[in-house]
Image (tube, rainbow, N blue to C red):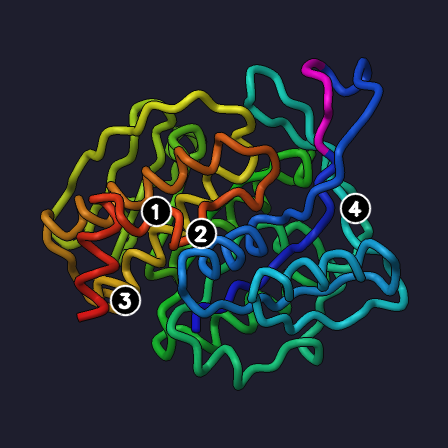
Amino acid sequence: MIVSIGEVLIDFIALQEGKLKEVKSFEKHPGGAPANVAVGLSRLGVESALVSKVGDDPFGDFLIERLTDEGVKTFIPRDLERHTGVVFVQLIGARPEFILYDGVAYFNLKPEDVETALLERAEVVHFGSVLFAREPSRSTLFGILEELKGKVPLSYDVNIRLDLWRGREDEMLQDIERALKLADIVKLGDGELAYLRDNGISPEDFDFKLFAVTLGAEGSELRSGGAEVHVPAYSVEPVDTTGAGDAFMAALLAGLHYSNMVGQEAIDGEQLRKIGRFANLVAALSTTLRGAWSVPKMEEIVLMKEVRELYHRSKR
């Protein structure tokens, strides 16, 4: 089982293209990067679970029901002090921009909310940066990661949300660097990579087992050991790119799972390319539907070449 830990929330996605001040109506979708990854994994046939926190409110009910419907095991207590998280999303040219709200349930994640034994049994534990933005979730997550380091492979999608760190960017960079030292598998967008390098943080200074960079229309780059590959993107007509990076992340982890490469110190170039093609395909297809839970189900793509070379081999 691959376990994600982090935010689950409601995405209110604008129904009209343009700035949020001009938008008149929104559509409710489930979201939150770690939740998106857990759902993507489940749709791709990999057993998954989510550790998070929601409010004791109708939005919390909605999210837990939807996760359960998707086959994700939920370890999500109710917070009696704070409401479920919400995000408003504007789409301009199918590219999303976000406004996240503070003081919500997932930022109140405490050590006693987390079943440590579940994480210790996981095939991979996946996390992002959002919980680092506030306490007590920051201390809770770092405590968990430091306890798991060396016991369970740790997967990190850096997923920078500057809006949460206004005036605290130095603190954010320190937390990201601390998390990178703990991670075995890391994914960045090309803009995030440039931002980190501009601020003195270089991926080459860390010892990752797998490092992936998404490049939008240019595809992706994957590195492991001495191997490095560039994988071209798939051409589609995007409707909504919300969650495309999370779709890539889910497929990357699923590709490692089906390749029996989880925890490997190094992956050769041929296998990296196969995993990269699979991840790029899933990410591209996810942009043809609205909302962040748009990863195709395995039965819908199982006959495609990029899937067969990983999935069918693992089933022999």
Q: In which quarter of the image is the N terminus?
A: bottom left
Q: Which residue is drawn at 63% across and 69% down?
A: 140
Q: Name the residue under label 3.
A: 262
The 10 Å Cα crowd at callout 1, few under 14, some 14 to 19, many 20 or more, is some
Amino acid type, label 1: Ile
Tell whether 64 sits left or right of 231: right
Residue 18 % position (x, y): 70, 14
Q: Residue at x 63, y 22 (%)?
A: 91
Q: Give the range drawn in magenta.
A: 13-18
Of tags 2 and 4, the one toward the viewer is: 2
Above or below, comparing residue 281 to residue 310 in the picture:
above
State how far apart marks 2 and 4 are (Cα).
33 Å
Which of the marked residues, 3 or 2, is nearer the chain's N terminus? 3
Q: Circle 1 — which element? A: helix
State how far apart marks 1 and 3 are (Cα).
22 Å
Amino acid type, label 4: Asp
Of tags 1 and 3, the one toward the viewer is: 1
